[in-house]
Amino acid sequence: ELKVEQNPLFLSMQEGKNYTIYCNYSTTSDRLYWYRQDPGKSLESLFVLLSNGAVKQEGRLMASLDTKARLSTLHITAAVHDLSATYFCAVEQYAGTYKYIFGTGTRLKVLA
Amino acid sequence: DTGVSQDPRHKITKRGQNVTFRCDPISEHNRLYWYRQTLGQGPEFLTYFQNEAQLEKSRLLSNRFSAERPKGSFSTLEIQRTEQGDSAMYLCASSGLRKTGNTIYFGEGSWLTVV
């Protein structure tokens, strides 16, 4: 059974600082997704990583995928308050049907 | 707005009552998913449709839960004889366009509170 773990679960950081969120998963997969969720809201797609070595960047966020290590990272550069949210990674599993297994999320709070 | 709509957005019901949620996916998407999310947790997979066929159901989905997708368009999720443990946000998502790959797009969710 595919398991997806994120760490840290909670992250409080000062504006302007850099930090990395980690997503580890237990079985082989070539596709990984990152989502953002604001309190009381649904999930917003951030990045789609489709192969080993994939790197995507949008603004202050950069995501990468290492399928051999079964690891994805979400790097935050020079954090701003607007990035405060919960971030989820989701691993695609295909066994006849497509299924997406989510991590437990990283709750990020950026302090002014 | 992702284009996936859910109704109702909030529902408060008494224990033992039945509730039904509706999801209208992005029109060209052939795949539709239902997830459940409780506070502080990630979304948990419940069930998956490809067109009108329900291809997979989670072990989490007890026999009080049933989902349908008639004609491969909108979907409904019904919970019978609700229990307090059913209180959660029920998320619908869809995918399936070639240009967006397998990215799943979520609706705003339907919050269920069982009192």
Image (cartoon, coloured by chain):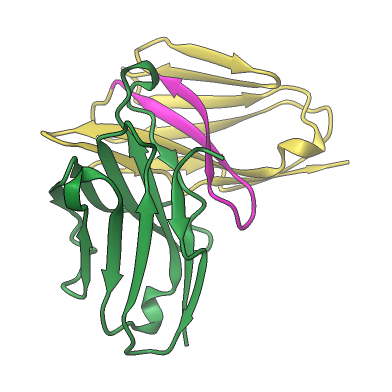
Chain colours: A yellow, B green
Instruction: Identify the residue at image location x=32%, y=90%.
Output: B16
Q: Tell which residue pokes out farthest to the front in this image.
A: B71
In the image: residue B26, left or right of residue A106: left
Please state the extent of the stretch shown in magenta in the rendering.
A30-49
In the image: residue B18, left or right of residue B91: left
On the rendered image, what quadrant is the N terminus of chain A found in?
top left
Give coordinates of residue A64: x percent, y percent.
49, 18
Q: Is residue B86 above or below residue B95?
A: below
Q: For residue A61, which quarter of the picture? A: top right
In the image: residue A85, left or right of residue A43: right
Give coordinates of residue A52: x percent, y percent.
35, 12
Judge whether residue A65 is colored magenta: no
Instruction: Identify the residue at image location x=72%, y=36%.
Output: A83
Q: Nearer the viewer, residue A29 or A50?
A: A50
Q: Main secondary structure of the magenta part?
A: strand
Q: Is residue B56 above or below residue B16?
A: above
Q: Nearer the viewer, residue B12 or A88?
A: B12
Q: Is residue A1 above or below residue A66?
A: below
